[in-house]
Amino acid sequence: DTPVQVVYPPVDVPPSLPDAQRDIDVVTLGSIAPDKYQLEQVELAAFMPKRRFAILGGVQSRTYARRVVRAVKMKGLTNVTLAFNAPAQRVSRYLDRARIFLHMKENEHFGISVAQAIAHGCTPIVHDSGGQVELVTDPTLRFSERGDVPRIIRDALIGRIPEPGYMHELRARVAHSTSISTGVPYTLRPKFR
């Protein structure tokens, strides 16, 4: 029997967390496309009007991106910031300011944005499927039904979840498991159009 080691794509993990004020409650990062559920994230922001949301990502579908922008405007949401096609440094600043990272895609193969958010100190909330469950091992931070997301966000924001020390351990695990493939730090360089 030969031991097997899973090697994840490399992610740049800052040596320490930034001193930035965490004034964004929920941030998302992913391709702006229907399978990343940004329209559902807008609905979630409307359902939680006292929480600040930032929706970031590279536009993969201009039609879908326009629908997302239109939904925010039609609902009159002042608690949502949209930052499409933002440069990597701006994305990093948003992650530094966020408390929760929400990733709604089902059966994501790995979810490099999840690892990047953890590296920036965000508490991840992910769908209970795909490769991201290997990363986010605490089942209280995963959901199967989208209707559970508001409760999980609230629980995380008030400190009910995760267990004390989990985020420190998770960040260390991300630093270790994403750097062993090359031994060289990696900086997220989103593929934007």
Image: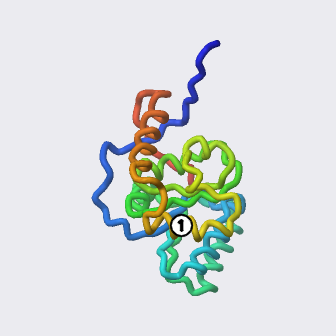
Query: In which quadrant will I find the N terminus?
Result: top right
Q: Residue at x 55, y 43 (%)?
A: 135
Q: Residues within 10 Å of mark 1 (few under 14, many from 20)?
A: many
The residue drawn where x is 58% and y is 69% is 151
Q: Is residue 63 left or right of residue 168?
A: right
Q: Quadrant of the C terminus?
A: bottom right
Q: Secondary structure at mark 1?
A: helix
Quadrant in the rendering for residue 18: bottom left
x and y percentages locating residue 9 in the rendered image: 54, 36
Residue that appears at 53% across and 67% down: 153
* Residue sitting at the far left: 19
Colour scheme of the rendered structure: rainbow
Locate residue 87, reporting x and y percent.
Answer: 46, 56
State the image coordinates of residue 120 (x, y, percent, origin top left).
Answer: 40, 52
The residue positioned farthest toward the top in the image shown: 1
**The one of 117 and 185 positioned closer to us in this rendering:** 117
Q: Is residue 19 above or below residue 65?
A: above
Q: Amino acid at mark 1?
A: Ile
Q: Which residue is mark 1?
A: 153
Task: Give whichever of 57, 4 is nearer the camera.
Answer: 4
